[in-house]
């Protein structure tokens, strides 16, 4: 039986009541790994670069096998950049190559570059008009309930490529679920972890375009934009992102 393990943490009390978001994490793991994951998450919240959390919530819940769906992990490719400007130019170029309109690219960068505090979720944007479609303000749309189908295999493959660690795994899993969501055209992301400057542009078309530098060191503001086809049903999209359990499968040729 599989279990969902989720953690969210904040500093200065509960996030909704004055506390500042520190970190969140979630896994879907076999029953015998639940305890180890809970401990790893507690440690992560207490030693995070955004601060040592003083409010930590952990939720453990059985996942009903019949509710699980699967999608492929999108393939990774890398774009080496050395400054924020170069990285963001590269991201614009990738988005255009995927088919996101210039208007939507401008609108996305305008939205993300105007943020003064990180959102918890993503902005959902029409990939043609650039209009923001969710009405979730600073919360945005959250993508949840996803993990690697086989973490040991994933670690073996990514470790060999020098891409071990939580950030790439979590981002690749999320980007794969997002890329395979009905309606998604592309995704744009950079981290809100102050010392984590790598970001990406994701799509089903080309995969996970990892851009090595997309922001300045010590910048604590990050964000995500999900670009969708015009006419996408936003309530259904939000429901898929938040609630559909998705296990991400490694492609055959990597095994
Ligand atoms: N669903 C939707 N949006 C989210 C989620 C989520 N589950 N988690 C984070 N976000 C949004 C939110 O606005 C954050 O401020 C922003 O994304 C960045 O989140 O080396 O670490 O978790 O290949 O800080 C990418 C590169 C790292 C990884 C991304 O994002 C690599 C990262 P963070
Ligand atoms: Mg994160
Ligand atoms: Mg973060």
Image: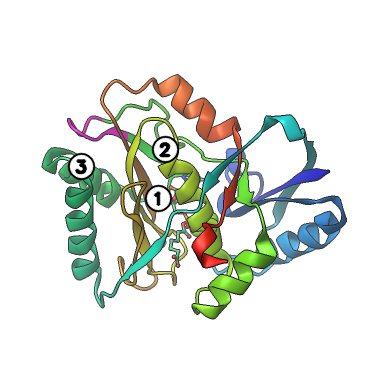
Say left or right for 198 vs 65: left
Q: Give whichever of discs 1 and 3 has the lower sequence position.
A: 3
Label 2: few (<14), some or many (≥20) within 10 Å? Answer: some
Residue nearest the observer in this picture, 13 or 113 = 113
User: Is residue 171 shown above or below 179?
Assistant: below
Residue 185, image x, y percentages: 31, 39
Report the residue marked by disc 1.
117
Label 3: few (<14), some or many (≥20) within 10 Å? Answer: many
User: Is residue 154 shown above or below 118?
Assistant: below
Q: Are marks 1 and 3 in contact (CB under 8 Å)?
A: no
Q: Are marks 2 and 3 in contact (CB under 8 Å)?
A: no
Label 1: few (<14), some or many (≥20) within 10 Å? Answer: few
Residue extending farthest left: 102
SS category of the residue bearing label 2: loop
Residue 222, image x, y percentages: 39, 55
> Cα distance, mark 1 to mark 3?
26 Å
Whether residue 20 appears in magenta in the rendering, the answer is no
SS category of the residue bearing label 1: loop
Callout in the foreground (1, 3): 3
Q: Residue at x 12, y 43 (%)?
A: 102
Residue 85: mark: none
């Amino acid at each position: 039986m599989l279990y969902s393990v989720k953690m969210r943490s904040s500093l200065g009390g509960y996030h909704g009541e004055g506390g500042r978001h520190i970190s969140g994490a979630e896994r879907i793991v076999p029953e015998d790994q639940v305890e180890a994951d809970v401990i790893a998450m507690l440690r992560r919240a207490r030693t995070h670069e955004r601060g040592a959390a003083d409010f930590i919530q952990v939720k453990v819940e059985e996942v009903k096998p019949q509710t699980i769906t699967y999608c492929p992990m999108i393939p990774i490719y890398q774009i080496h950049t050395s400054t924020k400007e170069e990285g963001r130019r590269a991201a614009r170029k990738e988005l255009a190559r995927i088919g996101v309109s210039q208007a939507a690219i401008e609108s996305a960068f305008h939205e993300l570059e105007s943020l003064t505090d990180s959102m918890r979720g993503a902005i959902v944007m029409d990939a043609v008009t650039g209009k923001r479609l969710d009405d979730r303000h600073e919360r945005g749309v959250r993508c949840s309930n996803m993990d690697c189908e086989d973490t040991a295999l994933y670690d073996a493959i990514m470790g060999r490529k020098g891409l071990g660690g939580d950030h790439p795994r979590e981002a690749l899993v999320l980007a794969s679920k997002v890329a395979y969501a009905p309606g998604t055209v592309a995704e744009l992301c950079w981290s809100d972890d102050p010392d984590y400057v790598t970001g990406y542009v994701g799509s089903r078309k080309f995969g996970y375009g990892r851009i090595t530098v997309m922001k300045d060191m010590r910048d604590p503001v990050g964000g995500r934009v999900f670009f969708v086809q015009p006419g996408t049903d936003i309530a259904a999209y939000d429901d898929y992102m938040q609630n559909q359990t998705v296990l991400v499968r490694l492609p055959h040729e990597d095994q």
